[in-house]
Amino acid sequence: MKPYKIIISGGGTGGHLFPALAIADEFQSRYSNAEILFVGALGRIEMDKVPKTGYKIIGLWIDGLQRSLSIRNLIFPIKLFLSLFKSIAILLRFKPNVVVGTGGYASGPLLFMASLLKIPTLIQEQNSYPGITNKLLSKTVKTIAVAYEGLERYFPIEKLNYTGNPIRQTIADTKVKTAVGKAFFEQISGKPSLVILGGSLGARRINQLIATHLNTFKKYGLQLIWQCGSLYYDQYKKYQSDTVKIMPFVSEMDQLYAAADMIISRSGAATLSELCCVACPALLIPSPNVAENHQYHNAKTLVDRGAALLIIEKDLDRDFETVLIQLLDVKKQKEMTDHLKKMAQPEATSRIVDLIEELI
């Protein structure tokens, strides 16, 4: 039998790319001789990260429409036309059994052309409020895997499969003990650890907030592991102390989650799926600078189930310390932990690959 061939398109952000890589790894583990090809957008994160994992990737010259008047909008139709043409060429040359999209600029033209060519297609939607690309693709793709319930408002119900979000296997399978995680990050024994997550590049407003409230954290007896982001490390490293550990980036996320007694974080879909699996109480501060405000909708899904706390950026100065006190409440922490465990979907990647097998 010929080896299966699969094309996966996902990227632009880690939130789209990490699920794509998780799906690829699971498929490869089931079919070791499978041929897996990634298709991404030139100049985006996937063009650098995917080759480092050993997978091949081809780039399309494509990006999104800008919200403001921009010269990039004038050339968007040209980029779209060329990306559609190149997608046809890739599909005819590679002859995949199935094409999978996890979001990002390249997934639009590729999956649209795959559907026209009658190649089985699946999209995986990470957010509780889908973006415009997946809404459009939902009309032509065969199967849709979603991370949240209730998305029949946006997608054809007969195509929907509630799977959860794929997360990094090191986190889904983690056996790291709290004491080991705390020792790894040189935390003081017996002192609660608050982890700050702003994404790999960092979050400017969250960093400003933490710097302003260092005395507040000291007052409540907290020690910090502050992942400030590579863009901001030089600005904030001066605050390093015995109780404040500042890092530009953390690769050992399984150790970090084990060390955390509570977390302050953005609310990207991948991060929230990981938080559910590790069941760590969290205060979520959605980024207001994302399409369709999906980080707010993601966070609200957890908050409505009693699984997290939420502050929007414009209310931080007014509400932060009040909500921090709620986060420190032991009874509230227990309540959030219980609800997070109920929402966890550690088998999401396996379920999605099951769907891919059905399509094949």
Image (tube, grey):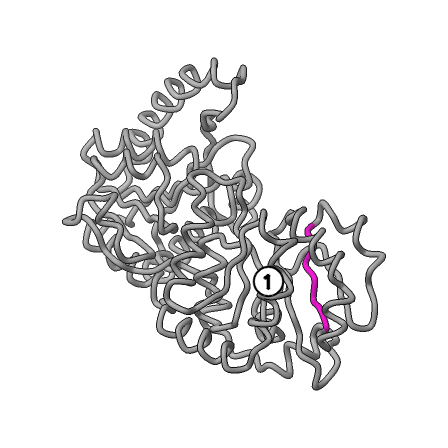
Query: Residue 81: horizontal and vertical position, in percent?
Result: 37, 18
Query: Residue 300: horizontal and vertical position, in percent?
Result: 42, 56
Q: Which residues are magenta?
A: 223-229
Q: Is residue 249 inside the magenta stretch?
A: no
Image quarter for residue 250?
bottom right
Q: Is residue 258 above or below residue 98?
A: below
Amino acid on which disc 1 is placed: Ile
Magenta span main SS: strand
The residue where tag 1 is placed is 264
Q: Residue most toward the front? A: 318
User: In the depicted view, which residue is nearer to us: 228 or 35?
Assistant: 228
* Residue 100 visible in the picture: yes
* Residue 346 visible in the picture: no
Q: Residue most toward the left? A: 158
Other-residue count near label 1 (Cα within 10 Å), few / some / many at <14 / 14–19 / ≥20: many
Query: Residue 37: horizontal and vertical position, in percent?
Result: 40, 42
User: In the depicted view, which residue is nearer to us: 83 or 129?
Assistant: 129
Q: Is residue 227 inside the magenta stretch?
A: yes
Q: Is residue 341 above or below residue 274?
A: below
